[in-house]
Amino acid sequence: MTKGRKITLAVFLVIIIALLVVAGLTGGAQGQVPGEDGEMVTGTYWALFPPLVAIILALITKEVYSSLFVGILSAVMLSVNFHPVRTVDGLINGFVESLADSWDVGILIFLVLLGAMVALVNKAGGSAAFGKWAIAHVKTRVGAQLATFVLGVLIFIDDYFNCLTVGSVMRPITDTHNVSRAKLAYLIDATAAPICMIAPISSWAAAVAGIAAGLGMNGITLFVKAIPYNYYSLLTIVMIIAITVMKLDYGPMKRHEKNALAGDLFTEGTKNEGDEKIDANDKGKVIDLILPVVLLIICCVIGMIYTGGFFEGETFIDAFANSDASVGLPWGALIAVVLTVIYMMCRGTMKFTEAMEAFPKGFKAMVPAILILTFAWTLNGATGALGAKYYVAHLMSGAAAGLTTMLPAIIFLVAVVLSFATGTSWGTFGILIPIVISVFPAESPLLTIGISACLAGAVCGDHCSPISDTTIMASAGGQCNHVNHVSTQLPYALTVAAVSFVCFILAGIIKSWLIMLPIAAVLMIGTLCVIKAVTKEKNA
């Protein structure tokens, strides 16, 4: 698409929104729009209009802040029937409510603390030392990408923690081997939510278990049974290994990787503030990176189980299932940062004043992610007020009758659409899991497959959505332009989604994970072989 056409499309969308505003204001002035709280659009297909506007504008204009703001504006206008004064009030209240929510604030604090930790490790020379070690031991681009994948798998506790930790550790290594920031962001994102969704001990497992437990079921048991059928998460792992070993890139990612080999790691957009050069201590050692990361993992795990009541008599599994990530993660990160400062001072790699300078630097590095998260949360809240998830859930429940074997595939598609439009996988399986449980008998194998389809679709939509907080954090972790990350990742995610959809159709018929898993892996690899052959012919 040419630059002129992109601008034309963007202007066209803006004109449509402006016409809607004018029509709404005119109708409101004449008393032709009934109700005062968006009754005409609440719970209808119009509820999906704001996030779609934001997503389309972001992909066209390559500018995420204004796109999210237009999406928020359209959601607020729809909810107040285009009343001008109430639109302004709604905008302000939407942002205030996002930043007043205890969960959101906890995650922002966690981001700032992680930024401070990264700044501490960089200043102490730990990242530079690890980079030198990695350069000596990781000899190829394939090795750098596989190392990123392995680290992402190992940090399975929480997707937020995963994105930022893997990014800060692996950036120097992938940069050395000319891996584009877009590919790094994809590797980070693909080993964040998908890995958390198949890890029984993770904040995602805890969320799913909590929802199922509230419906009278053993949440952890249901989650574990669903893992072998979670095709999107499992096939994403196959996808990463296959494209890395096969050296296969297609779609927009191909251009980014080609430019990276020529020395341009970014292709489009500018470097983040956190990508600036840091005067590192030449006394730094690899342990100055490894120890803080290990401390962070241990302290975050302790923080999670602490909030779940582990030290009050709960079992480890139950404590994790009942944990509050917005409290446990900041709690663990704060202790880890304090211990890291003490360690750095005892090692002599950093003075106290230098350690304190890391906090504003860490905050500065996280500003882009914080801004995008704030906009995304506000858009999610405004869209939620319009009843988007209930509209989609109603469509699914209405289509459930008489579609027994096809229902897992339908559930997968519905979850993908809902998660993509709202940018939240947790909210998606929060509304769909109760419906799935009510559709299938408790003893039916389709219940497990249906739950897996719900979870897989939620992760897929979250993985594709530009307004997903995990996608935003992956951009921050890879210090990649956010729209670049979304546009390069989308073809890869849709490839896995297409194969997963076929697998859920087959699973509804076969109902055996032992048979389906090998079939799924063969389908995924076969699809990639076809793509490689087709793209090779086009380039010939």
Image (cartoon, rainbow, N blue to C red):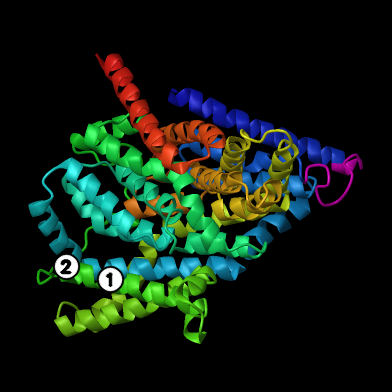
- Residue 30 drawn above or below residue 433: above
Residue bearing the label numbered 1: 294
Tell me the crowding category of disc 2: few under 14, some 14 to 19, or many 20 or more residues within 10 angstroms, Cα based.
many
Q: Position of residue 301 (x, y in %)?
A: 40, 72
At which x and y percent is residue 211? 61, 61
Q: Dot 2 corresponds to which residue?
A: 125
Q: Residue 269: horizontal and vertical position, in percent?
A: 36, 41
Amino acid carrying mark 2 in the image = Gly
Q: Is residue 119 above or below residue 408?
A: below
The quarter of the picture where residue 183 lies is: top left
Residue nearest the viewer, comparing 424 with 109:
424
Which residue is the extreme one toward the right? Answer: 31
Residue shown at 50% from the left, 23% from the top = 5
Q: Is residue 336 visible?
A: yes
User: Which residue corresponds to the image point at 44% horizontal and 61% vertical from the top-left?
Assistant: 200
* Picture mark count: 2
Quarter the N terminus occupies: top left
- Distance from disc 1 to disc 2, alpha carbons, whole Å, reads 17 Å
Q: Which residue shows up at 77% across the image and 37% down it?
A: 22
Mark yes or no: residue 333 visible.
Answer: no
Circle 1 — which element?
A: helix
Q: Which residues are the magenta region?
A: 28-42
Residue nearest the observer in this picture, 132 or 34: 132
Is residue 183 rendered to the left or right of residue 489?
left
Out of 226 and 326, give the one closest to the viewer. 226
